Image (cartoon, helix red, strand yellow):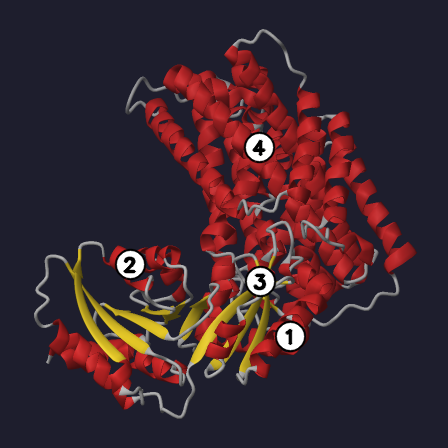
Amino acid sequence: MSEETVVSEGEAADVAQRTGELERTLGLTQALAIGTGTMVGAGIFVFPGLAAGEAGPAAMLSFGIGAIIALLVALPTSELATAMPESGGGYYFVSRSLGTLFGCMVGIGQWLGLVFASAFYLIGFGHYLADLVREVGLGISVPVGSIALGTAVLLTGVSITGTENTGDLQNWIVGVLLVILTGFLGHGGLDVLGILGRERVPKTFFPYGTMPVFTTAALVFTSYLGFVQIATVAGEIKQPSHTLPRSMIGSVLLVAVLYVLTIFVGTSLLGSERLAELGETAVVSVGRSLFGTFGAAAILGGGLLATLSSANASILSASRSIYALSRDDLVPKTVQRLNERYRTPHVALVLAGGPIVGLILYGRVEVLAEVASLLHLVMYGLICVALLVLRHQDPNDYQPSFRCPGHPVVPGLGGLASFGLIGFMNPLSIGLGGGVLAVAVGWYFYYARSVTLSEIADS
Amino acid sequence: MTRSDTVLSSILVDVELPDPVSLSPTLVDFLASVRIVLVGWYAVPEQTSPEQARDQFGEKATAALDSVARSFEEAGAEVTKRVVFTGNRLDSISRISTEEDCDAVLIPAETEQLRRILVPLRGLPNARRMASLVADLVQADTSAITLLHVVDGDRDASLSREHVLEPAAELMREHGVKADILRLETVQADDPGERIVEWAADADIVVLGESEPSVREILFGTVQQQIVEGVDVPGILVRHEREGEETAERAFHSE
């Protein structure tokens, strides 16, 4: 700990003399809330119906596979993040170890990956709001797409003009969600195991065979994108060597348990076919079958909060990714300009929010989710490679305070699994994701080829 | 670890950048006799990376703080400048007050004269630090330093003078405060904060001790916050001395 202080102060002293110091304001709770808040929207509130429809109760395994891959990547990411607690996260690690070309792919991939993810969450939000209107019985059907579009514009606008800090709000949202989910899943789990009611564990675990377990794992991997966003704000985290590994690994474990339980309770209570019919908002019916109208209302409310919070967190993270690229001159400096009045990165926020609108118009939830996952999986794989390279080269300024256990097996498996999971996606998603990466490579040759990056420890 | 008397007391003064609220010249003159740790904080919303804000606003912020620093330097103060880009002002003040080992934190307010100093006491912890700070602040025209011991309504106040006020006054005299401007007062109150606010109406500045372990908690703390919000004169919050020091002090007094 003391070492860390000395290094950061020494480095800070020089810059601070000229233009000021940077406060680290995020503690462990906030870091966990960022990770959990970005992830929890998808896995519980959007995917269960889709996943159960494809893999049946074995979708539990799909979420489990996702969790294992996420953990295999979270460990190397933790090591890299404690060695380089800088803003930029995955982009920073990869660009500093594998060079500008891979840096461009990861940086642009992370930005657009989050854009795809945010569009996906917003469509989920649209489904929940439409469901709510239906439940209340207003007798009008609200088009999901229009809600999602309006919300995308609204969120971007609020991010630009809102100067109230919503960090505490984010903590509260995550807290409320965890309370709701613990109640439901705890009660539901005991219920279906026969402890509180009649035993209802489904008889066929693999109604559609084992292959869909893997394709579903690829589909639902969007539920595990959030932990790496913690590394993106590593420069703002207090005691980074303590907080980063705990918050990244902790948030993955937390959401993984919730996801697996949700599928278990859902498929046990309603069955896979019924969940699939209910689609994006299937868990509302799970809530109703457990606690009646109150249950449905609580899950509806939770779904609205969770999808909105995930969408918002993704927009903010995307803007940070753009800043990281611009700081290194891989994109024009103008994109990092802050609004003089609101002090918010209005150009970057529009570059994050704008494409979301286009993607919502396109509207295919599965494809949006898979492209978001694909772009992140490429980054995850490259993060693992980055660790292998850095450990091999062992540069002097590489001084992680957390060391990834099981080296080189853990990062090796993490890299293979990340790239491997892409193979189970549908061809359209692979095509689109590959297209984005090709554009990133093109951008490198067109614009960023001559850029020289700073050293690892230099900011 | 006793602080040598040759070390000047230090007060943290924070101002918002890039447009600092101007401090009254009387207050600047009054504080010129101690070391000023001038913290300029630039509020960064959570959508923005503090680094990004520094890239763009750093120079303007530094220049703004320099001009505030000049007013202190012209009044004769020794000034340490810190500019910080922060999402949480309290985090920054609390961190820097520890790093710079500040004795106190200023709560500024408009003021015309600074001749009567009120020092509410709830006991003796911190008294040494308060004494040396007050001694450094005393000016030729200081007319009164009132040591006000506030005793909870249901406690015995008869030993207040002997156990708290006299030892505190003795510490002040040891640090060079003239005996004839010291006033010793004991009051009993069910609501100490409210009573201190009443007394503050007849004072020009209030020097408060920190009963919680950190500046953050004082700024949020109960009694102190009530006082800070209640009085309309400037306040100086004296930071808690280090834990070991305090424990030693307590052991000494219980003997």
> What's the residue at 41%, 21% (across, down)?
A295
Q: What separation in Å lies between label 2 and label 3 (alpha carbons)?
A: 27 Å
Kind of residue sitting beneath label 2: Glu
Q: Please name which of the two marks, 2 or 3, marks the residue nearer to the observer.
A: 2
Of labels 3 and 1, earlier in sequence is 3
Q: What separation in Å lies between label 4 and label 3 (alpha carbons)?
A: 41 Å
Q: Same chain for labels 1 and 2? Say yes or no.
A: yes
Residue A59 position, x and y percent, is 54, 30
What residue does disc 3 label?
B21
What residue does disc 4 label?
A307
Q: Residue A398's quadrant in the figure? A: bottom right
Residue found farthest to the top: A139
Q: Chain of mark 1?
A: B
Q: Are marks 4 and 3 in contact (CB under 8 Å)?
A: no
Residue B112 position, x and y percent, is 47, 69
Instruction: Depth check: give the residue in front, A421 or A286.
Output: A286
Q: What separation in Å lies between label 1 and label 2 (alpha carbons)?
A: 37 Å
> What's the residue at 82%, 49% (across, down)?
A440
Crowding near pointer 3: few (<14 within 10 Å), some, many (20+)? few
Of labels 2 and 3, earlier in sequence is 3
